[in-house]
Image: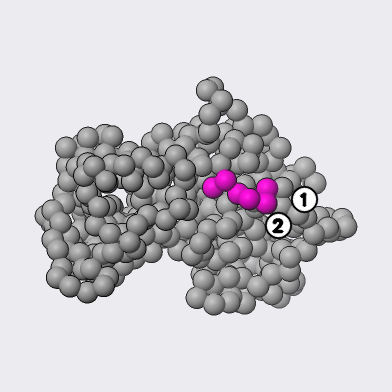
């Protein structure tokens, strides 16, 4: 059985930043991820740009520049993360999901993955907050033309696409698909799109809906999906309507996977399963296990935690015995 001081679970941007910080501090560690590094970002549609400015999503003190001085794309950011892993020769073991966390009778923990077992003194869970789609639980949700992920607008060229949702991801999917030649309709449970949608998206999509080029179905929820249409029910009651659709995008949000927290015995609060932790150290209710990144918020309803405001090194300070200070976030008003 291998031994190390710290096991990091998760290799997204904050997990990678933490690994760099541990290496700089001389702390022996191993890092595991069930998928590839930056996996959540990898399922963004090609060419997707971050809402946050580049300096806000840069990690580990490594500058992030783009050739057009604009906001970073999905492809550029994945390249950036790979570069950091190579630059610091980080011991990341991808496609090795952690399946168990158990106390070690000799002290510390035993971490079990799909390929190995590792003894360690401390564990940091950086598992993110968007592991799986938030399902609607309606008939037809698993049909092959239905997806919870916006993969590529090209797929919908000259096809009827119904987008379900009313936040940034839904608005962007509707706009990009429309500009790629799709015939787009949008269903949203509220009376109008909210002002939380980014300022460069909201006027355009509202204008396209007002002109009828994107077909709006406000105050509706889908209740059934068939191979050629979606049945929408008005939220205020009344007759259902059937909207023709060759493809359906359910942009209804995502949930965190807190199963490892539960398995390790960490106290979770509320329906969002927010882990209990010490703000000065990020240590959870289980001594020796820490939480970092967007996993700190469990499943977020209104997103408040992003890459840009999760840059904390309290964990490293606590592990190395340095004086721990309660940091003020660098960015009090996230752009994301």
Residue toward you, 272 or 199: 199
Residue toward you, 237 or 7: 237
Q: Is residue 104 visible?
A: no
Q: Is residue 36 left or right of residue 11?
A: left
Which residue is outermost to the top?
67
Locate residue 193: give its quadrant: bottom left
Q: Which residues are magenta?
A: 331-336
Query: What residue is shown at x 68% (from left), y 67% (from top)?
Result: 289
Query: What residue is shown at x 72% (from left), y 47% (from top)?
Result: 330
Do tag 1 and tag 2 residues touch (Cβ < 8 Å)? yes
For label 2, the SS is strand
Q: Could you tell me which quadrant the N terminus lies in?
A: bottom right
Q: Give the answer, above or below, for where 192 lies relative to 80.
A: below
Q: Which residue is mark 2?
A: 6
Query: What residue is shown at x 52% (from left), y 45% (from top)?
Result: 38
Q: CA distance from mark 1 to mark 2?
A: 8 Å
Q: How many marks?
A: 2
Q: In the image, residue 151 lies at what x, y percent?
A: 33, 43
């Amino acid at each position: 059985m291998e031994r190390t001081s710290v096991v990091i679970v998760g290799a997204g941007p904050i997990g990678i930043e933490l690994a760099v910080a541990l290496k700089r501090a001389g702390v022996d560690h191993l890092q595991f991820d069930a998928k590839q590094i930056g996996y959540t970002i990898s399922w963004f549609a090609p060419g997707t740009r971050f809402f946050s400015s580049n300096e806000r999503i840069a990690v580990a003190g490594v500058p992030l520049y783009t050739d057009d001085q604009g906001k970073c794309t999905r492809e550029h950011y994945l390249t950036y993360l790979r570069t950091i892993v190579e630059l610091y020769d980080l011991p990341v073991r991808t496609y090795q999901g952690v399946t168990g966390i158990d106390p070690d009778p000799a002290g510390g923990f035993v971490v079990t993955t799909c390929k190995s077992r590792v003894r360690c003194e401390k564990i940091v869970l950086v598992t993110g907050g968007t592991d799986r789609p938030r399902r609607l639980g309606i008939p037809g949700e698993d049909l092959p033309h239905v997806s919870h992920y916006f993969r590529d607008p090209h797929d919908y060229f000259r096809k009827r696409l119904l987008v379900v949702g009313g936040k940034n991801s839904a608005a962007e999917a509707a706009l990009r698909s429309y500009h790629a030649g799709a015939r787009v309709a949008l269903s949203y449970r509220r009376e109008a799109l909210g002002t939380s949608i980014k300022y460069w998206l909201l006027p355009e999509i509202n204008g396209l809906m007002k002109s009828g080029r994107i077909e709006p179905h406000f105050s509706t929820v889908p209740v059934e999906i068939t191979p050629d249409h979606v049945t929408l029910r008005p939220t205020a009651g009344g007759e259902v309507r059937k909207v023709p659709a060759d493809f359906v995008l359910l942009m209804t949000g995502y949930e965190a996977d807190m199963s490892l927290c539960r398995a390790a015995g960490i106290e979770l609060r509320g329906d969002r399963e927010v882990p209990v932790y010490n703000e000065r150290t990020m240590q959870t209710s289980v001594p020796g296990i820490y939480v970092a990144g967007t996993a700190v918020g469990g499943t977020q309803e209104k997103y408040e935690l992003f890459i840009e405001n999760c840059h904390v090194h309290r964990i490293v300070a606590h592990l190395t015995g340095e004086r721990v200070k309660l940091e003020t976030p660098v960015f009090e008003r996230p752009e994301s």
